[in-house]
Image (cartoon, rainbow, N blue to C red):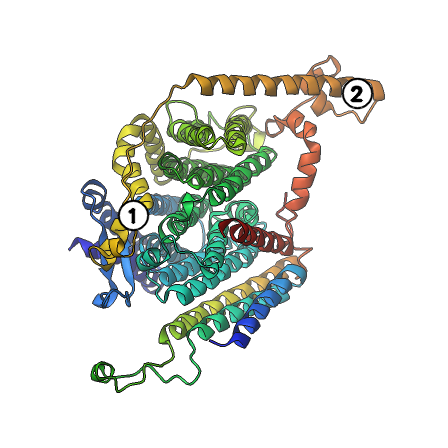
């Protein structure tokens, strides 16, 4: 009975997508009923798998049309739900259910909602199918449906500024990524003569040929596009900003998690490539660059949702860094951060949506003083902001700490200086995240309330309930992290690191052992929150950083006075003086001094984020080429 | 398995990527994506092809008795290609419809003009 649940959940969502279009185009009641029934039933079906899979340790397999393997060759399309798949499936169902509830209120003023819900259900079904399928071509089909539905949803409010443009950029970069994935899948089929991931994993175990390395590079690049790591991230910022907020939440909560899932599945399960130190280094460097560029771009944004989009990119950088370490600790930290990112970034997008619904704008320069008008939204926003910045009682603290701990342990174990730098980068990025959320809080919820916003009302209940649920989950995941680790993270990390059960369940007992796949047992991760050396290094870093800022600013101040360079009152405010007393700094310019000090860096970055789709295509091709070359040079 | 096919498909993929990266006209960008798709499809079909092979339609008894020649064209890549062609057609249609709407709104389909979101 239970083995039918995964495929039923996926089919139900696709079926409901058709039913909404046929029966619900004109009748809001019918439409909302179909959507909520489908979403709720799919969620219940997936939650029912927690007990057998996560607690009892079963793996669920399902062959479409009962085409079971014949003499060790998988010929049918199989669904396979192991602990890793279920972990991501849980994130997916939670996100789309909350987004569905939120849409009921948030989208109620829009037209053509039948199309919206059709696309919403297709997107949900495709991501759910992607994380549970055991067949790599099926995975590719799901990726394509996901891209297609995402693009249509991005451009859904097509009278919005930039929505069409964002959709087009997303489509071009997204389908380039899909083409890379498809090429990789074709090469893998040529190499293994099967499309089943479990069988591929057994065939490719410690047995990589040039063809399969090429396939690995192309598939990693393809999933890199889907998880928006730098430099594939450029359409993501536009799409998150232009899409309706309930869809931005889906993007941040599950579409880029699908990319992360694909990365883990390909790197760990199919290719077993994560024991090679050069692959680890490549992925970790991509992750570190992603988190740094994401957060520095976020600091200068003037749009609430665009700022959140760049933070989303930055947080995915943490996840990629952690899973790139290839250790149990790193994988646990990465999965935990992926889960927390779904929770807090979903929450933050929902609050941004509530602000947009209530005021009609997300421009930080036009907002202000909303804490008295929308106190409940403000409290939810603060919980999300504290979580993403990693303040202690909330979930972001635990997972970020695990990431630091994992990278630091790696630096000590391997004696490689790069990992030490990555640790420092991760710490600095966390500080900058906090800084930019202070800016948002100041610009949106505190400060002066503009005259046009005097009549702002609190968001309706159907939008508040998902925010409350998300906030509660953020706090609970932070307080009860040992339980989360025991029942979700440890089984998921174990199943990624040990592929024997995954292969055996699909192709029969003993298949993995015949192919020479090792059975690795992984010990549960110990949470250690106190390590004096780490704190010492942290304080040294902060001291040096503060020293640099002080020295740098003195010179700058002196130069400005002596040489009479172009006087910038906003900048001078940060370094005191009587003349600057009355110079006004808006909430969104809270870090003007920082921006001025780094103007060379920002000029380059803003030049790179040019908004021209062909430039973005060039970055995509270049990054794919870099990944391919690195894989070839280092893995042979 | 024909070497010429492999070379041709790689050439198609590279030409498509070149088109996407260098042409500023959005319709040409969409055409480039299409060419990449055709290259990939050709690669997949070539993977399963056997020169002189037959259709893979046999009775089980033929195979067991060794009557049938064990030399046929792999049908799986053809199924994959069909799926991929359908998906590619949908993506092209959607991209072109987006270009039409962009033209109505921006009065231009030059990539340099379609950049209201940047920085």
Quick one: which residue is furthest to the top in this view? A578
Height in image: A35 above or below A537?
below
Marker count (numbered): 2
Disc on the earlier residue, 1 or 2: 1
Place of residue A465 in the rendered image (x, y in percent of width and height, measured from the top left):
33, 37
Give the residue at x 47% y 30%.
A411
Q: Which of marks 1 and 2 is in front?
A: 1
| Label 1, residues with CA under 10 Å away: few <14, some 14-19, many ≥20 | few
Query: In the rendered structure, the residue with mark 2 lies on which chain?
Result: A
- Residue A599: mark in rendering: none
| Label 2, residues with CA under 10 Å away: few <14, some 14-19, many ≥20 | few
Element type where label 1 sits in the image? loop
Q: Can residue A535 be seen in this view?
A: yes
Query: In the rendered structure, the residue with mark 1 lies on which chain?
Result: A
Q: Do the residues labelled 1 and 2 touch (CB within 8 Å)?
A: no
Give the residue at x 28% y 68%.
A75
Place of residue A511 in the rendered image (x, y in percent of width and height, measured from the top left):
24, 57
Quick one: which residue is furthest to the right in this view? A563
Q: In the picture provided, is A186 more to the left or to the right than A515?
A: right
Height in image: A91 above or below B62?
above
Q: Can residue A25 be seen in this view?
A: no
Element type where label 2 sits in the image? helix
Point out the image quarter for the N terminus of chain A.
bottom left
Quick one: which residue is furthest to the left in this view? A1
Q: Nearer the viewer, residue A568 or A450?
A: A568
Mark 1 and mark 2: Cα distance apart in space: 64 Å
Q: Mark 1 points at which residue?
A: A518
- Residue A559: mark in rendering: 2
Q: Nearer the viewer, residue A302 or A193?
A: A193
Place of residue B114 in the rendered image (x, y in percent of width and height, measured from the top left):
65, 55
């Amino acid at each position: 009975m239970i083995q039918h649940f995964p495929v039923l959940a996926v089919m139900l969502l696709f079926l409901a997508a058709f039913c909404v279009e046929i029966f619900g185009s004109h009748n809001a009641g019918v439409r909302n009923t179909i959507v909520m029934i489908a979403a709720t039933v799919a969620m219940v079906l997936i939650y029912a798998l927690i007990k057998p899979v996560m607690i009892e340790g079963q793996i669920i397999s399902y062959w479409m049309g009962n085409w079971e393997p014949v003499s060790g060759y998988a010929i049918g399309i199989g669904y396979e739900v192991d602990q890793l798949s279920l972990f991501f499936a849980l994130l997916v169902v939670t996100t789309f259910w909350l987004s569905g509830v939120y849409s009921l209120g948030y989208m109620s003023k829009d037209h053509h909602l039948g199309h919206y819900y059709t696309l919403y259900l297709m997107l949900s079904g495709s991501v759910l199918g992607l994380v549970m399928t055991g067949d790599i071509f099926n995975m590719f089909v799901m990726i394509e449906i996901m891209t297609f539905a995402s693009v249509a949803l991005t451009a859904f409010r097509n009278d919005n500024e930039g929505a069409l443009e964002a959709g087009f950029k997303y489509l071009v970069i997204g389908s380039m990524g899909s083409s890379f994935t498809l090429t990789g899948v074709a090469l893998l089929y040529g190499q293994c003569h099967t499309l089943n991931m479990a069988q591929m994993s057994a065939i490719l175990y410690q047995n990589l040929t040039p063809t399969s390395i090429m396939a690995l590079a192309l598939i990693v690049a393809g999933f890199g596009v889907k998880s928006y790591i730098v430099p594939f991230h450029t359409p993501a910022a536009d799409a998150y900003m232009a899409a309706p907020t309930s869809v931005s939440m889906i993007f941040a909560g599950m579409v880029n998690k699908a990319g992360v899932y694909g990365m883990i599945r390909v790197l760990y399960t199919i290719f077993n490539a994560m024991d090679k130190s050069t692959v680890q280094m490549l992925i970790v460097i991509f992750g570190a660059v992603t988190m740094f560029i994401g957060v520095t771009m976020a600091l200068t944004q003037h749009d609430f949702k665009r700022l959140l989009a760049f933070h989303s990119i930055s947080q995915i950088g943490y996840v990629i860094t952690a899973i790139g370490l290839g250790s149990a600790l790193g994988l646990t930290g990465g999965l935990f951060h992926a889960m927390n990112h779904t929770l807090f970034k979903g929450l933050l997008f929902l609050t941004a949506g509530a602000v947009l619904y209530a005021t009609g704008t997300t421009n930080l320069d036009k907002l202000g003083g909303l804490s008295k008008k929308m106190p409940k939204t403000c409290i939810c926003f603060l919980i999300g902001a504290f979580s993403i910045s990693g303040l202690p009682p909330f979930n972001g603290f635990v997972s970020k700490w695990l990431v630091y701990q994992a990278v630091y342990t790696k630096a000590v174990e391997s004696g490689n200086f790069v990992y030490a730098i990555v640790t420092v980068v991760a710490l600095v990025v966390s500080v900058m995240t906090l800084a930019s959320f202070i800016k948002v809080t100041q610009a949106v919820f505190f400060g002066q309330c503009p005259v046009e916003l005097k009549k702002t009302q609190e968001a309706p209940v159907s939008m508040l309930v998902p925010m409350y649920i998300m906030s509660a989950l953020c706090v609970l995941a932070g307080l009860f992290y040992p339980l989360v680790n025991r029942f979700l993270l440890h089984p998921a990390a174990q199943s990624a690191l040990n592929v024997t059960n995954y292969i055996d369940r699909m192709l029969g007992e003993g298949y993995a052992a015949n192919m020479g796949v090792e059975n690795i047992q992984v010990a549960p991760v110990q949470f250690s929150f106190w390590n004096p050396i780490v704190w010492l290094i942290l304080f040294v870093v902060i001291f040096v950083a503060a020293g640099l800022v002080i020295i740098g600013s003195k010179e700058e101040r002196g130069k400005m006075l002596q040489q009479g360079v172009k006087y910038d009152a906003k900048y001078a405010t940060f370094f005191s003086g009587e003349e600057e007393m009355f110079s006004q700094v808006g909430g969104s310019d809270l870090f003007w001094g920082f921006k001025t000090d780094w103007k060379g860096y920002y000029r380059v970055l803003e030049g790179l984020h040019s908004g021209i789709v062909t430039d973005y295509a060039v970055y995509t091709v270049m990054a794919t080429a870099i990944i391919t070359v690195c894989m070839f040079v280092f893995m042979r | 398995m024909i070497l010429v096919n492999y070379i041709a498909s790689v050439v198609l993929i590279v030409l498509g990527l070149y088109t996407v990266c260098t042409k500023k006209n959005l319709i040409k960008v969409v055409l480039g994506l299409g060419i990449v798709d055709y290259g990939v499809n050709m690669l997949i079909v070539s993977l399963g092809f056997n020169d002189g092979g037959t259709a893979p339609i046999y009775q089980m008894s033929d195979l067991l008795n060794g009557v049938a020649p064990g030399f046929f064209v792999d049908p799986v890549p053809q199924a994959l290609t069909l799926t991929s062609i359908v998906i590619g057609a949908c993506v092209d249609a959607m991209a072109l419809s987006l270009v039409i709407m962009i033209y109505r709104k921006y009065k231009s389909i030059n990539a340099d003009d379609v950049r209201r979101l940047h920085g």
